[in-house]
Image: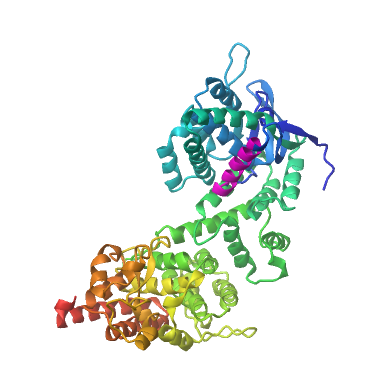
Amino acid sequence: MTNYNLDTGKKYIKDIFSPECFYNIPEYQRPYVWGIDQIIMLLEDLAQAMESDDKKEYFLGCMIWNTKTIQENGLEYVCQDILDGQQRFITLYLLQGVIRDLSNDGKLKEKVTERMKQEEDIYDGVPERNRIIFEIRDDKDFLEEFLLTVDGTQKEDALEEIIKMKGTATSVKNMASAILIMRNWWQKVLKEKGSEDYQKYLKKYFAYLSSKVLAIFLATPDNLDDAYNLFTVLNSRGLQLQVSDILRAQNLRVIEGDSERKKYAKKWSSFEDNIGAPFRGFDDFLWSLVFIKMKYRSDDNQSLTKGFEFMWKRNYIKKGVSTFDMVGTYVDHYEAITDGRITTKETGELFSNLNFILTSVFGSAYMAPLLHYRELYGDYRIIDFIIKLDNLLTIPWLTGKRTSLTRTFIILRKMEEFKGDSFDNASIQQAADEFLDSEYLKYEYADENSNTALDINELFYNLENEKWGAYAGTRVNKTRYLLLKLDLLLGNFNTRVQFNKNNSSVEHIMPQKIANTEWDIELEEHENWIHRLGNLALIDRRKNASLSNRKFSDKKIRYQGAIETRANTNYIFMRYRDWNIDSISENHIRVVSILKDYYLGNSIETVLQLKKNIQNSDQLTKNMNPESM
């Protein structure tokens, strides 16, 4: 690390937010991401420290700044780029606004207002200026309405709407949430202390925060290279940033010109805001891009930073604009795959529904090949591809094998080989046809270097005999997957499949416990069938043990509002008057047969034919036994 001429020292909160201090969140910084755990811990730590000894100082940690001199409208002032400590800084900024709006002390309110914003003084030539500026984020309007305006933090309904609103920037959403978390914490203090003591406590807390809470600061001189170097070195040595933040800084550093850097920094922030499920975060999404570009796993990509360094070294992509553009391209593909735009007249929402099922219960492993298929072939036969991909990756998952990653890399390599140098639509579509019909997307394909062949009969045996209803923890996702797949195949292709882990549950129609109930079933038969697929259904309500043990006729009445979007569950409760071993066995044969046909066909043609067969079978059943439906 370079030897820096650092300005160091300690500052209390009152000094950090003093009239002569201004701060900037530079373009290479991550969004505000603190959540309930970090915020509550800070609030309670401060409270405990104050109550233990309000004369003793509380050390908040280290903040690192890059000192810049700013020229604005002929005036010069000093501003600190916050390199490290942004999360704590913003939290303290928000906290003071919340305390201001909860307090009935006029002097306290004035003090906080002064700390948040420099008021204009036309006589002394002092302009209005916010204490904190964000170079690239859309946080300014949020701060103006909810922090810089007195009583802004009281607008709880508006804050809730911001959190719920689709497309809200990550930083804004988290700041809105932070304000509500703080207000809720203070509401508990009010309940404990009563109104009069509560106001005294607020003043004492604010005084302690101002005069006894301190941070050590390090400030570099006004040097952008030093700032980037210090930021990268410090945060690659264990401080709590995502790898994507380091990658952003490394790429911004090679882009020349402030305006260009700000433009691409803003793009990166929008990329982060637009990535959601099935990815656990933006780092997870970037892993998919490493796999797409490298198409193998080795020592060269044991970490995300190693993967990108290797790609830059080998000229797979260039550092800077090239990397930003590549990431942006795949963010666009992600949005197309997840926003419901991929539809056809014949298949309706089939693509979106299948993607939704995989997103909800399978994870992100399927996304790399799906993203890259769209990069190479667009939307041409992409529905065929997701069906084949779904089958190839879920068979080993359902049977407990570990071949999915190897097959994924093979698919990534081969789809690119088939595409080759084709550029016109006709040759691209021909290449897609050849790839989709190739051996590499068939179950029996065995790579020469590893055993990737899939035994579909093992899957069929599991569908028949596995105790799917006994799964718990993450394994229950396998059961959910099969039941959601049945809802998809039995339902209307123009209707969106619904699922929420918080209020959708796997129901044993014949209950798990039959002792002292009205269920008249032999114990041996009960044990044999209780957890089989034919006795399971999805319902859209939380589990209720007392309801689970009720008779089938009672369940039909009680579950009416909880199965409306569940095609498979609806079929069961409409088709059968009684639920016994014969009906469970019959239903088991039905659902296993549907799933077998889906996997055997492994194509869009099969799915469409299967849909016709199901519709014809339902109509035949209605004609033969109209009272049962």
Horizontal side of 270 relative to 510 (left or right) equals right
Rendered location of residue 365, percent (x, y): 54, 68
Decide whether residue 421 is among the magenta residues.
no
Horizontal side of 58 relative to 519 (left or right) equals right
User: Which of 176/254 is in front?
Assistant: 176
User: Is the C terminus in the top left, top right, bottom left or bottom right quadrant?
Assistant: bottom left
Magenta residues span: 34-51
Residue 419 placement: quadrant: bottom right
Horizontal side of 165 relative to 626 (left or right) equals right
Rendered location of residue 131, percent (x, y): 61, 29
User: Which of 511/441 is in front?
Assistant: 511
User: Does any portion of residue 379 appear in the rendered image?
Assistant: no
User: Measuring 42% from the left and 76% from the top, which residue is drawn there?
Assistant: 469
Residue 129 placement: quadrant: top right
User: Which of 200/125 is in front?
Assistant: 200
Decide whether residue 42 is among the magenta residues.
yes
Above-or-below relation of 28 to 98: below
User: Measuring 32% from the left and 79% from the top, which residue is drawn there?
Assistant: 610
**Furthest residue in direction front, as rendered:** 516
Rendered location of residue 498, percent (x, y): 36, 63
Above-or-below relation of 302 to 530: above
User: Measuring 27% from the left and 75% from the top, which residue is drawn there?
Assistant: 572
Rendered location of residue 181, percent (x, y): 51, 42
Q: How many marks?
A: 0
Residue 552 placement: quadrant: bottom left
